[in-house]
Amino acid sequence: MSLGWKGASIVLGSVSFLMILIQGKFLLDQRSVFDFVIGILVFIFSVVIISGVLTLLFQLLKKIPGRYIWVLVTSFVFLLFSVIIPLKVALPLILGIMAFLSLWGALLFKWIKGNYRHAKISKRVGASLLLSIMTIGMVVGGYWLLQSGEVNSPDFTLSQLKASKHYDNTMLNNPANPGSYRVNKLTYGSPHTYRKEFNQKNSLETKTVDGTNYLENWSSVRTKTLGFGPDKLPLNGQVWYPDGQGVFPLVLIVHGNHLMTDYSDPGYEYLGKLLASRGYIAVSVDENFLNFSPYDDLFLISPLKNENSARGLILLEHLQLWEEWNKNSNNPFYQKVDMEQIALIGHSRGGEAIAIAAAFNEMNHPPNNGNIKFDYHFSIRSLVSIAGTDGQYLPSGKSLPLKNINYLALQGAHDMDVNSFTSSNQYNRISYSDKEDYMNASVYIYGANHGQFNEKWGRGDGAGTANQFFNLQQIMPREQQETVAKVLISAFLDSTLKEKKNYQKIFQDLGYAKKWLPDTQYISNYYDSQTSYIATFNEDIDLNTTTVPGGKLNGENLKEWKEEKVKLKFTEAQYSAVQLGWESNDLTSPASYTITLPDRGLVLEQNNSLVFSLAAIGKEGKEKGEEALIDFTITVEDSEGEKASLPLSHVAKLPPAIKGNLLKKPFSDIGPNTEPVFQYYKFLLNDFQEINPQFNSSRLEKIHFQFNLTKQGKILLNNIGIRHETK
C-alpha cells in the first residue's frame, strides 16, 4: 500500500472509531462500564467481520474477468425475461441455474482444452467425475424441462365434502345446458379498424373514442402497427344473440392483458353461445390494442402506462352504443335490449376494468380530470371477475369502492399469472345501502389456471419458456374449466338479471351444483344485502369490540387470538379477520370464542340464519383424511340463558387450505403455495330451536364457537352476521 493510501486508512479509521466510541457512550451511558465495553466490542467486531467479507467479495470480483461479469449480468436479464414467474420464486431459481451452467461450462472447456492433462491423477479423476455428474444433470434437466409435470389431486372433492342427501331434492336445472334459443352472430366495428373481421358486409359501423386523457406513453410504433392513435380507439365487438322475439339482458365480456397481436376476444365464444341460447345478448369486446406488445413498446423500454382506466371507459362507450341501437328503428337490435339488466364480465385485467367501468358509471367526472363530463348512469346490475386483478388502478391512491351491485369472483388455485386471489379485495369492498336483493359471491377452484377461461389462451399461463417450469399436468382439462365457468356464470346471471333467485343457494352452498361441476375441490364465499354483520374485524384495533357498536368479543383458553390483515400468496389483502388457534388434549375444557350481541342495532326474527366465513391455516398436510378436517361446536344462547348447539359438520367440516404448487418437482415448494380463502357457513336458527325448543332465536344474545371436536387447529374467522331468510 502506498503512503497515500496508508495515510487515508489511518485517518479515516481513527476518526470513525473515535466517533463510534462517542456515539456508544451516548447510547449506552445508562449501562454499567462492563456493559459498555462488551456492547461496543461486540458491535465493532461484527462490523469488522461483515466489512471484511464484503472486501473479500470485491477482491474476488476484481479477479473475475470483465468479460464473464458482462456475460453474467446480461444472462441474468435474459433469464429474468425468460422465466417470468413471481420474483420470490424466480430469483433463487435463476441464480441456481446461472451457478450450475457457469460451473459446468468451466469444467467442460478446461477438459476440452486439456488443462487437466498434466494435473495430478486425483484432480483429473475428481474433475472427470464432477463433469460427468453435471453433464448427466444437464441431460436430466433438459428432459425435465420438456415434461409437463406430475398429476396432483385435491385431498377432498366436492362430492366428498357435500355428501348429504338433501342436495338431491333440488328442483334446479343445470345452468350450463344450452337454452331454447337458436344463436345468431354478427360483428361491429369502427371504420378502417385494424381487424377486418369487424368490418364485414353485415357488420354494424361504430364511432371511435378519444382516449388521450386516459393513456400514457402511447408510442408512434404502436400507432403505425394499429393504424390509429389514442385519439381514435375503435369500438369493436363480436355479438352472439338469441334468434327470437323479446327483450334480452345485455352482457359485455372483456379480456385482459395478453400479446396485442394475439387477439383474445374470440376466446369467449363458449360463453357467448351459451348465454345467447339462454336469452342474453352477449358481446365479446375487443381491447387488444391496449395490451402488451414487446415490439410496439420497444421491448419494455417505453411500455403503455396506466391504460386500465381506458379499459373501463371503452366498456361504457360500448354500452352507449347499445343504448342508441336499442332506440334506433333502423337497427337490428331495435327494442331488443333490456338496458335495465346489464352485466359486465372481465377476465384478468378485464376483471379490474369492469369494476372501473362500474365506478365511472356512477360519476359525473373521471377522478383525474374534472373538466371531462360523464353522463353514463347505465343500469349495470352484475359484475363477474374471472381471475381478476385489483389495485392496478388507484385514483388518488384509493381502491375502487363499489356499492349496490351483484358481484362474482372466480379464481383458480393454480393460476400462474394472477398468483394471489386479488379480486377477493374487491369482493370485500362492496357494500349495500338500499333494500334491493343483491348478492356477492366468490369461488376458488382447485386445478383451474388463468388461461383456460379463454379458448385462445394456453394451458400454461407464463410467457414462452416460463411455462416449462410450471406443473401443467395438474391443471384440469380445458373442457372442465369451461364447464365451471358456464355453470357458475350462467347461474349467477340468471339469479341477478332474470330473478331466478333459487340459483342463489348454489353460491351459498356449492353442494347444490355438485352434479354439474367437475368433482374437484372448491372454496366458496358469499354475502348479500339481506345480511347484517356483527363483526367484520375491519373497524378498529380492539380485540373485544364488534363492528356493530355495543357488542363484545371474548376468547378463552386460546393458543392464538389476534386480528390482522389476511396474507395472500404474494401480497397482503386489504381486509382483516380474527385468527384463532387452539391446542388441547383435554376437550372437556375447550378453547372458545364468544360474540355477545349488542342491545341495539340488529333486528332478530324467527326466520333468521347465523352466517360466518372460515379459512383454515396452519395444518399443512400433517394430518390425512378425516383428521385433516376441522370441526367444532357452535352454541347459541338467548337472553334467558337457553342454549342450543350444532357441530360445524352440520353444514360441512372445514378442509385445510388448498395447496396450489405452481412449479414442477423438485421446485414445487419454492415460494408460498397456500393462501387463506374463506368458506361461507350458514346455520338456520330454526335448526337450533329444534335441538332446544326453549331457545328463542328472536332473543339471541351470545354465539359461542367451542373448539371441542378437533384437538388442535388454526383458523381465520370473519363476516359474522345475521341473515334474514326470505320465503
Image (cartoon, rainbow, N blue to C red):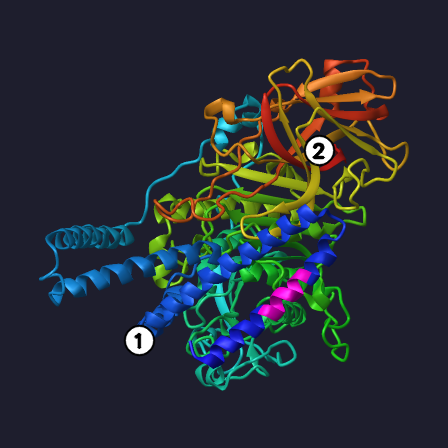
Q: Is residue 17 magenta?
A: yes
Q: Which residue is pictured at 50% across the width and 32% down the height?
A: 158
* Residue in the foreground of this view, choosing between 189 and 349: 349
Which of the two labelled residues, at mark 2 and mark 1, occupies the earlier sequence position? Answer: 1
Q: Which residue is pictured at 62% across the width and 78% down the height?
A: 211
Task: Give the overall secondary structure of the magenta segment.
Answer: helix
Badge number at residue 611: 2
Q: Is residue 664 visible?
A: yes
Callout 2 environment at 10 Å: few (<14), some (14 to 19), or many (20+)? many
- Quadrant that contains the C terminus: top right
Q: Nearer the viewer, mark 2 or mark 1?
A: 1
154 lies above or below 254: above
Disc 2 versus disc 1: distance between alpha carbons?
65 Å
Q: Which residues are magenta?
A: 14-21
Q: Is residue 331 left or right of residue 82?
A: right
644 lies above or below 565: above
Callout 1 environment at 10 Å: few (<14), some (14 to 19), or many (20+)? few
- The secondary element bearing badge 1 is classed as helix
Q: Is residue 223 magenta?
A: no
* Residue in the foreground of this view, choosing between 79 and 405: 79
Percent across and percent down for residue 16 are: 61, 68
In the rendered image, which residue does mark 1 sit on? Answer: 67
- What's the residue type where badge 1 is placed? Arg
289 lies above or below 419: below
Percent across and percent down for residue 101 are: 27, 60
Badge number at residue 497: none
- Quadrant that contains the N terminus: bottom left
- The secondary element bearing badge 2 is classed as strand
Percent across and percent down for residue 163 are: 52, 24
